[in-house]
Image: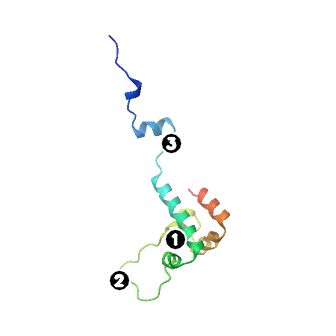
Amino acid sequence: MGTFFLPWTAKKTNERVLNEANKRRSLVRTIRKRQATFLGHVMRRGKLEHLVTTGKFEGKRSRGRQREKIIDGLATWLGTGKVSDILAAVKDRVLWRDMIANAY
């Protein structure tokens, strides 16, 4: 009788689709890209979120190990290493988009 095959019921896994398209999962890269675009938006506004993101609050520090700021992680990811370079680049929207697009 032969094999019974209905193409509309054939199931493909996500891994198979990614392999056929020669792509790989890039969740961390997607998260960092979204963080960078949000950071650019917040820094250009310059309101309370700007203060929170840069960590410029007065008062006592918390005890224990200090938390890593988002901006420090993005500086490492973008390859600049300096937060001051990032803060300068954020003001120029075209430069900022190029930095995000060319990040690894």
Residue type (three-letter) at the residue carrying disc 3: Lys
Would you name the residue on which mark 3 appears? 23
Left or right: where 10 falls relative to 39 = left
The N terminus sits in image quarter = top left
The C terminus sits in image quarter = bottom right
For the residues labelled 2 and 1, the Cα–Cα distance comes to: 21 Å
Would you name the residue on which mark 1 appears? 71
For the residues labelled 2 and 3, the Cα–Cα distance comes to: 44 Å
Residue type (three-letter) at the residue carrying disc 1: Ile
Q: Residue furthest bottom?
A: 59
At 43% from the left and 36% from the top, the residue drawn is: 16
Classify mark 2: helix, strand or loop: loop
Q: Nearer the viewer, residue 65 or 37?
A: 37
Classify mark 1: helix, strand or loop: helix
Residue 63 — which label? 2
At 53% from the left and 59% from the top, the residue drawn is: 33
Labels 2 and 3 touching (C-beta < 8 A): no
